[in-house]
Image: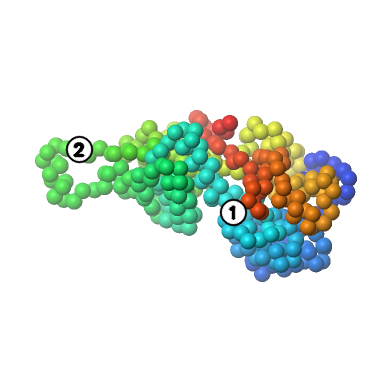
Amino acid sequence: MAAGVFGGDSPQGETIQVVIQDAEGDPQAATQAVENLVLKHHVLAIVGPLLSPTSEAAARKAEALKVPLISLSQKEDLIKTRQYVFRLGLTHSQQVEALVTYAMETLGMRRFAILYPKDSYGEDFIFRFWDEVKKRGGEIRGVEGYDPRSTDFGDQIKALTGLSEPNPDETKLLEKSGIELTPIVDFDAVFIPDSYRNGGLIAPQLVYYSVSDIRILGTGSFDHPDYIRLGKPYVDGTIITDGFFRESRRPSTREFCQKYQEAYGEDPTIISAQAFDVAKLIITLVRNFGVKDREALRESLLGVEGFPGATGNIKSTSPGELKRPLFILTVTGSQFEEIE
């Protein structure tokens, strides 16, 4: 669509040819795909791939062949020490930075708890979140992990609030004294880096165990109607960050979504938007700024400043990193809304 192949604007100026290669989810196939694109088709640049193993293999080959590759991967260290590899993927560190910045600087939060799935996704997020909070002078008041396949999170919630089951002697003493334990909620928000399914199940259980008057913080994986369906009304006020929001009021995002609907008859995904932005950026540099070879493109990508994309205004920050302001979303009633 960015090149005028599938609807959208009619191409003007120099003809753009799009060549497709399938990485097949296999590092060896990804390496061969890059080699074919460069040596057989003589491409100016490569967009993709998505998966971490194939992205690493493709990046390694692109660097060796000195062809700019703009990855859509979330792999954190993909661009490190490489001169020809760029990224416009939504990384965990980008999400955490935006989320903590908003929670602490805009909402004034200082104390946080973490409920996380014991898998690679959850564990990577908790360490990044913890580091970001501590860096800004905040506190982590408690951390509890659970089996990602679980549907009952009561033990973890009770542990966070000091309601873990006492031993038999303590139980007898409490009963004899007529003392009833109450939860200690000494945090402003709980961060849950998990799927929309588990997030939607955890929200009502927090309230069941008297954990109220706090905010739920989540990642872009919460951006799904079922998160609200499963947790309603207890997910109201949830704050998440995401790299794309179809209902955004940003002009470039609205224009993209409208043209995408006209071209394909369906709503775009974050991957669609990122791929469009990268292709449109390359084509703009070629048509409007006279970029004709790979070295000139590499230099131009390093100097990108405020390119209006469907995912936001894109800017080159650290070498290879193409960043844009993330979307901050909240749940209001039965839908997500963008926070300006």
Kindly identify the amino acid type of the residue bearing the numbered disc 1: Gln
User: Quadrant of the rendered structure where residue 29 is?
Assistant: bottom right
* Residue 74 tag number: 1
Q: Confirm or deny contact between disc 1 and disc 2 (CB under 8 A).
A: no
Kindly identify which residue carries mark 2: 180
Label 1 or label 2, whichever lies nearer to me, is 1
Q: Position of residue 309 (x, y in %)?
A: 70, 41
Residue 304, percent across and down? Answer: 72, 46
| Left or right: 274 in relation to 332 | right
Element marked by disc 1: loop
Residue 187: image quadrant is top left
Q: Residue at x 73, y 43 (%)?
A: 264
Can residue 90 be seen here? The reply is: yes
- Rounded to the nearest whole Å, what is the CA distance between mark 1 and mark 2? 47 Å
Colour style of the rendered protein structure: rainbow
The single residue placed furthest to the left in the displayed view is: 176
* In the foreground, 266 or 45: 45
Q: In the image, what residue type sits under mark 2?
A: Glu
Task: Of the two numbered discs 1 and 2 on the same chain, state the one appearing first in sequence.
Answer: 1
> Which residue is painted at 71% across and 63% down in the image?
62
